[in-house]
Amino acid sequence: MPTCRGCNDDVDKLVSVKIAGKVKKLCEDCADRAREEGEIAEASEGVIQGMMGFKGRR
């Protein structure tokens, strides 16, 4: 049985997710949470850059 790196539970299937430039194998629940956190972080970074007047790309 494979083990999820996020919650350390034994699962039937692991999903590969790219987080902060690194690929991690997580269960589907942890992968969904990681994707949501990444989307929120990206959106908040965009708002901060807009407030500071940043026009370039990261």
Image (cartoon, rainbow, N blue to C red):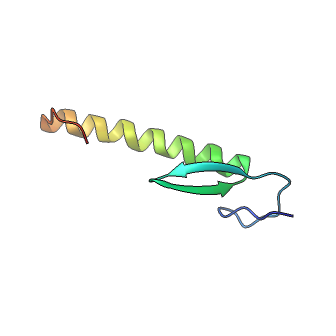
Quarter the C terminus occupies: top left
User: What residue sits 31% from the left and 41% below the top?
Assistant: 45
| Residue 30 place in picture, x, y as percent | 66, 51
Viewer-nearest residue: 47 or 13: 13
Left or right relative to 12: residue 51: left
Q: Give the image location of residue 52, x and y in percent.
A: 14, 39
- The total of numbered circles placed on residues is 0
| Front one among 53 and 57 | 57
Left/right placement of residue 1 relative to residue 41 reads: right
The structure residue drawn at horizontal position 45% and vertical position 53%, both measured from the top left corner, is: 21
Q: Quadrant of the N terminus?
A: bottom right
Measured from the top left, where is residue 56 in percent x and y?
A: 17, 35
Horizontal side, residue 10 vs residue 54: left or right: right
Name the residue: 72% across, 46% down: 28
Residue found 29% across the figure and 35% down from its top: 46
- Residue lying furthest left in this view? 53
Q: Is residue 7 above or below residue 14?
A: below
Q: Between residues 20 and 33, which one lies in front from this camera angle? A: 20
